[in-house]
Image (tube, rainbow, N blue to C red):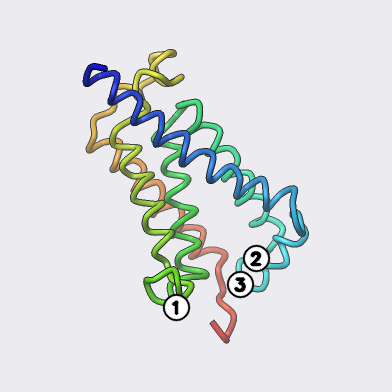
């Protein structure tokens, strides 16, 4: 296997792993357990109101970005959505518990966000719809891809949190 094939295999592996993981999270919110109604009640309880809106946004953003990552379409935008999801999760749920996941901390969110930023920097590779359709995302530089995903993710999360999040008094 030459270096280009190895690179394409690794970007495919990273995209599919991240995409499948986040898709399953979204699917679970929408169609398993308490479904949208149960997820909405949970969002209300952590201060993201209206809970139903955030349950839908989160579930469908997770499923949509997951599919985009799996097929390698608009990869840096999908990675940006994943960064936003992880920043919101870290701030609203995990930050107050410290870093380590064993104590409910934000370690998992951080690693997923970093992996998404790395994915955005590397791009989707040749084995992707970005490459097949010769989309601008296919030729984005490492720095531009990382900056786009980070900017969209952190900016989107900051906007959502600033507008909608009102932490409960016990938070």
Residue displayed at 39% across by 36% down = 14
For residue 68, above or below residue 48: above
Q: Earlier in the sequence, mark 2 or mark 1?
A: 2
Residue displayed at 47% across by 58% down = 159
* Image x and y of residue 133, in percent: 44, 13
Residue displayed at 57% across by 85% down = 169
Horizontal side of residue 29 vs 131, given as left or right: right
Q: Residues within 10 Å of mark 3 (few under 14, many from 20)?
A: some
Q: Residues within 10 Å of mark 2 (few under 14, many from 20)?
A: many
* Image x and y of residue 152, in percent: 40, 46
Q: Which residue is mark 3?
A: 47
Q: CA distance from mark 2 to mark 3?
A: 6 Å
For residue 90, above or below residue 134: below
Q: Which residue is mark 1?
A: 96
Determine the secondary structure under disc 3: loop
Q: Residues within 10 Å of mark 1 (few under 14, many from 20)?
A: few
Determine the secondary structure under disc 1: helix
Q: CA distance from mark 2 to mark 1?
A: 17 Å
Considering depth in this image, is 164 or 72 the residue closer to the camera? 72
Horizontal side of residue 31 vs 75, given as left or right: right
Q: In which quadrant will I find the C terminus?
A: bottom right
């Amino acid at each position: 296997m030459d270096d280009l094939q190895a690179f394409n295999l690794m970007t495919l592996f990273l995209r599919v792993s991240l995409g499948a993981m986040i898709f399953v999270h979204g699917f679970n919110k929408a169609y398993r357990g308490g479904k949208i109604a149960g997820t909405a009640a949970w969002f209300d309880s952590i201060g993201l109101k209206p809970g139903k809106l955030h349950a839908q946004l989160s579930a469908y953003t997770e499923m949509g970005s997951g599919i985009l990552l799996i097929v390698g379409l608009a990869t840096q935008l999908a990675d940006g959505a994943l960064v936003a999801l992880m920043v919101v999760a870290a701030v609203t749920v995990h930050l107050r518990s410290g870093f380590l996941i064993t104590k409910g901390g934000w370690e998992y969110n951080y690693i997923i966000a970093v992996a998404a930023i790395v994915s955005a920097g590397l791009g989707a590779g040749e084995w992707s719809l970005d490459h097949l359709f010769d989309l601008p995302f296919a030729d984005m530089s490492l720095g531009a891809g990382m900056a786009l995903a980070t900017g969209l993710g952190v900016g989107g999360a900051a906007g959502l949190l600033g507008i909608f999040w009102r932490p409960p008094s016990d938070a």
